[in-house]
Amino acid sequence: MKLKKPSAKTATQTAAITGGVIVGGALSKGVFGLIHENTVTDDPTAQKKAENMGLIKRAAIIVATGAGAAFLDGNDSLSSVTRGSLIGMAAVQTLEVVATLAKRGGVTPESSASTASQKFLARTTGLGCPCNSSTGLAFMPPAYSPRYSLSLENDRGLGNPDENDIWETKDLWSVSA
């Protein structure tokens, strides 16, 4: 392997392939979303069956896009973008398969990993995102302070300054007679 000064043609081809890989990677998630419906159930057998179907569909995408990239011939920019897109689709789907199999195989997610090697393995296999585990995630509804009124009856700071004093705070919990 030798490093040399790139020509304009190789720079253009590299940019086309790189752009294609990025676009193909993003498109692959959309394509997978079109052909597979994620279902979440409490039944473990149904969940595993849906996960297995997802793995089979991902494998089909990997094989189809890998074969397409291998059989594609041409040295122009359009061929490079197309080849890069196919490679990007195969790469992203392969990473998703690895993450699914690692999760199934018992790799500790990063959020619950205790050692540096466990965290490294979790990040390498795609389990580094805290969204991959449900620990520590909770829904917190927005907190509304009773000091601020959400009604449009009193536009603060507009109209009569005596009635709409911007510094006046009304007690929303008080009962008017």
Image (spheres, rainbow, N blue to C red):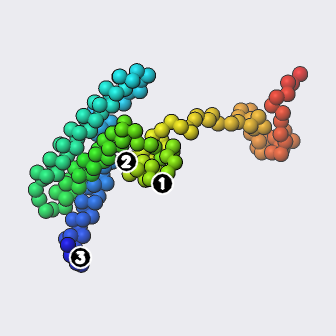
On the image, the x and y values in percent for residue 137 come to: 55, 38
139 over 125 or under it: above or below: above
**How many residues crowd around disc 2 within 10 Å: few (fewer than 14), some, or many (20 or more)?**
many
Q: Amino acid at mark 3?
A: Leu
Q: Secondary structure at mark 2?
A: loop
Residue at the right extreme? 177
- Mark 3 vs mark 1, foreground winner is 1
Q: Quadrant of the C terminus?
A: top right
Q: Earlier in the sequence, mark 3 or mark 1?
A: 3
Say which residue label 2 marks: 125
- Mark 1 vs mark 2, foreground winner is 1
Say which residue label 1 marks: 116
Q: Quadrant of the N terminus?
A: bottom left
Alpha carbon distance from label 3 to label 1? 35 Å
Which numbered circle lies on residue 167?
Answer: none
Q: Position of 141 compared to 22: left or right?
A: right
